[in-house]
Amino acid sequence: MNDEELRQKEFAERFGAAIETWQFEVNSYWTRTSYFALFQAGAFTGLWGIITSGRHIYTAIAYSVSGAMMTAIWFVNNVRMHQYVRYWWERTGEIEEEFQVSEKRSLVRDYEKIRKDKGRAHRFGRYSWWVNAVPAVFLGGWFWMLGWSLASLCRYLHTELP
């Protein structure tokens, strides 16, 4: 093999590994998000049943707080996963740059140039904001359930106490 063939082979291996890792991070991000959303929806539904039954009010309060904490963890996980995805995307662009891939053949650098020329903000907001809005909606739901649980506790204590 001559030097150019070795260089092309090295580029293919490094670029392929970076893209594969980026793709894995994206897929694992969506898998985790799906599991978190499914778990949260199930827990939310269960809590709804506990609150509407009028019993186990202290359990409902504890579940509301736990649900809010799990949602906060979900949000932090989303932010961290976005950083991993971004890192591998940028690393892939650096590999293209290192091997002097022309803009015409570039996958990452050309996309990034177009994206930056058009501006980061879209009129509806950045995509990452919308992705992180999902846990925020669940967090709002947990706080609403907590308020409902506390209101139920107050009604219970008001009727039980002389």
Image: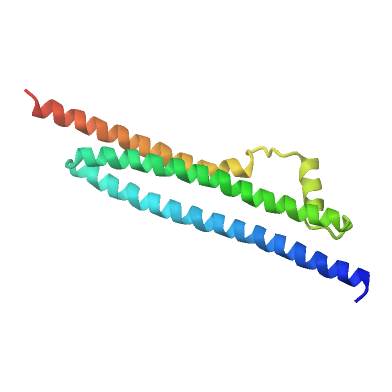
Indicate the quadrant where residue 29 lies: bottom right
Where the C terminus falls, by quadrant? top left
Is 160 placed above or below 132 here?
above
Q: Residue at x 58, y 49 (%)?
A: 81
In this rendering, position of residue 161 left or right of residue 136: left
Q: Nearer the viewer, residue 14 or 19?
A: 14
Q: Nearer the viewer, residue 66 or 144?
A: 66
Q: Nearer the viewer, residue 58 or 130?
A: 58
Indicate the quadrant where residue 105 lies: bottom right
Image location (x, y in percent) of residue 50:
23, 45
Residue most toward the top? 162
Image location (x, y in percent) of residue 136:
47, 39
Q: Nearer the viewer, residue 143 or 90?
A: 90
Q: Residue at x 76, y 63 (%)?
A: 14
Indicate the quadrant where residue 92 lies: bottom right
Where the N terminus falls, by quadrant? bottom right
Q: Would residue 13 be visible to someone looking at this image?
A: yes
Q: How many numbered dots are placed on residues in this image? A: 0
Residue most toward the left? 162
Image location (x, y in percent) of residue 49:
25, 47
Q: Residue at x 23, y 42 (%)?
A: 59
Snapshot colouring:
rainbow
Q: Would residue 131 be visible to someone looking at this image?
A: no
Image location (x, y in percent) of residue 19:
70, 61
Is 90 placed above or below 162 here?
below
Q: Residue at x 16, y 42 (%)?
A: 55
